[in-house]
């Protein structure tokens, strides 16, 4: 499922990252196999993603491109 449609507060595993953004997202810790949780919705359609002890704010366009499964 797209990360945009994933439920909040449920452990997720990242399974697919767009090739064009793979290096940049990997530098942030978002690489296939990463364990994450959607912490909260933001105005404008974004989400706050909990990744280990870090929190990342991601926009709706990117959230549609990232694929996850429930861990």
Image (spheres, rainbow, N blue to C red):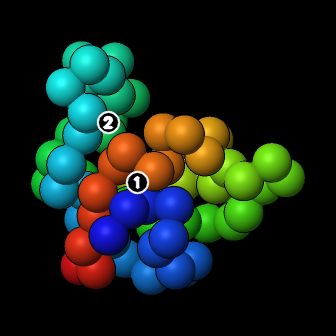
Q: Is residue 27 visible?
A: no
Q: Quadrant of residue 2?
A: bottom left
Label annotation for residue 69: none
Q: Image check: 66 left or right of 5?
A: left
Residues at marks 1 and 2, CA–CA distance in whole angstroms: 9 Å
Query: Disc 1 or 2, which lies upstream in sequence?
Result: 2
Depicted 43 relative to depicted 59: above or below = below
Element at label 2 = loop
Q: Residue at x 51, y 61 (%)?
A: 4
Depicted 36 relative to depicted 44: above or below = below
Image quadrant in which the N terminus is located? bottom left
Label annotation for residue 52: 1
Q: Residue at x 25, y 33 (%)?
A: 18
Q: Residue at x 52, y 80 (%)?
A: 7
Q: How many numbered marks, from 0 up?
A: 2
Q: Image check: 1 left or right of 15?
A: right
Image quadrant in which the C terminus is located? bottom left
The residue that disc 2 covers is 29
Q: Residue at x 24, y 40 (%)?
A: 17
- Pick out the residue farthest to the right: 43
Instruction: Name the spot of residue 55 as percent of width and height, x first.
Output: 57, 46
Front in this rendered view, residue 31 or 64? 64
Q: Image check: 12 left or right of 5?
A: left
């Amino acid at each position: 499922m797209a990360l945009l449609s994933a439920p909040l507060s449920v452990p997720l595993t990242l399974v697919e990252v767009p090739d064009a953004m793979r290096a940049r997202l990997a530098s942030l810790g978002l690489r296939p196999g990463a364990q994450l949780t959607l912490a909260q919705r933001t105005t404008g359609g974004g989400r706050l993603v909990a990744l280990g002890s870090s929190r990342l704010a991601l926009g709706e366009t990117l959230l549609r491109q990232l694929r996850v499964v429930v861990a």
